[in-house]
Image (tube, rainbow, N blue to C red):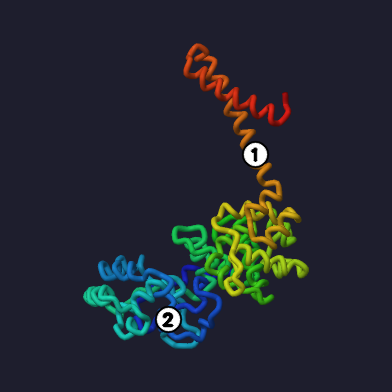
Amino acid sequence: MTTDIFQEEFKEVHLDQLELDPENPRLPRDHDWQATVDDGFLKEFVRRYNLIELARSIADKGFSPRHAEALLVIEHPVKGDHYIVVEGNRRLATLKLLANSETRTTVGATSSEWSELAEDAAGIMDWAHIPVIVYPDRPSLDEYLGFRHITGPSSWRPEAKGRFIAKLLSSGRTVRDVVRSIGTSYRMVRRYAEAHAIYTQALAEGIPMDRVETGYGVFYNALDQPGVREFLRLGRQVEIDALPVSPVPTDRLEQLRDLIILLFGDPESGVPRVINESRDLNTLGTVLANERACANLLRDRDLDRAWRISGGGRNDLLGLLSDLHLRLAQVNGQAREYADDEEIREEVRRICDLVNDMAVRYGIF
């Protein structure tokens, strides 16, 4: 249960009192951020985000209006008079870079533009009076963060969304609680919860997931394909009410490893991925649902060939024929108005010749 939101307090503090959040769901998993000092955070933010855009904005207008631009913080659990910024970490990272030339040098933000922006910012920013809104604890910010970054205007990457939803569910909340709290759909919460649980399970099994973190959207969407779900023997998403534990059955863990390699490849062993774009996921699902096609794909790594083995080419042809029938019916209706138009009659003859040729080929008459 969240704490009353009216306990928040607006104040202004020195920049040195503000620290980046080690629990930020956008930070990579494979690092101990709790033990990381500011420079380590800043290097990651410089590498991951285009902070120069924020620097231009701050150097131009500062934090104005101050209440609207305030960083959302909680009190540091150990350091008195210090605060952890829960919302606004990119802005805080940018402020720290603008305020300190040594820090910029340490983290590699050494372009002439950074120096120029730092001079401009020094003229309008008061580093001793950074606006913040102090919240009593993290849970009191959950609803705001969930709405803003999952369903709202400043959407996080899929992996961060999954991690945040998993955090909410691991605190004892149900899927229903999370849906009502952040204003999203049951389907979205269940999908992210399941994907996070499978990701965590794969890590625990020693399956390399570094490439998955950077391409999490592909992983997340693959798990929604019926053929992939059958391949992994996943349960019904609609039955998920809490954070799942080990959704992939033990006897399908090797298939989970195969799926990760199919999606992202394995550079260490030189095995390429078979997915080149998101629309390939439907094809992959079709192949994995067909035992013969799946075996062929795992052996030869040729998605198109495996898809044809699965009958995908036949299904596509049936779809084209159905669409063609509808279009011909439409043409037939319109062509009657132009029965004496020689140009239209010629086009109809061409179609009839093609249809007759197909009929002979398939032994229809």
Q: Residue at x 44, y 83 (%)?
A: 40
Quadrant position of residue 96? bottom left
Give the mark count.
2
Give the crowd class for mark 1: few <14, some 14-19, many >=20 residues within 10 Å.
few
- Spot occupied by residue 328 in the image (x, y as percentages of width and height): 59, 26
What kind of element bears circle 2?
strand
Q: Which residue is mark 2?
A: 19
The quadrant in which residue 94 appears is bottom left
**Spot occupied by residue 302 in the image (x, y as percentages of width and height):** 63, 57
Residue at image x 36%, y 84%? 106
Which amino acid, mark 1?
Leu
Q: In percent of the image, x 44 and y 77: which residue is there?
A: 44
Q: Nearer the viewer, residue 247 or 122?
A: 247
Q: Please determine whether, in this image, residue 80 is positioned above or below residue 87.
A: below
Image spot of residue 146 (x, y percent): 52, 64
| Residue at the image point whose x is 68% and y is 59% from the top | 297
Q: Is residue 104 visible?
A: yes
User: Relative to 323, is 297 above or below?
Assistant: below
| Residue matched to label 1 | 317
Q: Which amino acid type is marked by label 2? A: Glu
Distance CA(mark 1)–CA(mark 2): 59 Å
- 82 displayed left or right of 109: right
Image depth: mark 1 or mark 2 in front: 1
Q: State which quarter of the image contains the N terminus.
A: bottom right
In the displayed structure image, the side of residue 358 where residue 134 appears, left or right: left
User: Which residue is nearer to you in this view: 191 or 167?
Assistant: 191
259 sits left or right of 211 in the view: right
- Identify the mark nearer the N-term, 1 or 2: 2
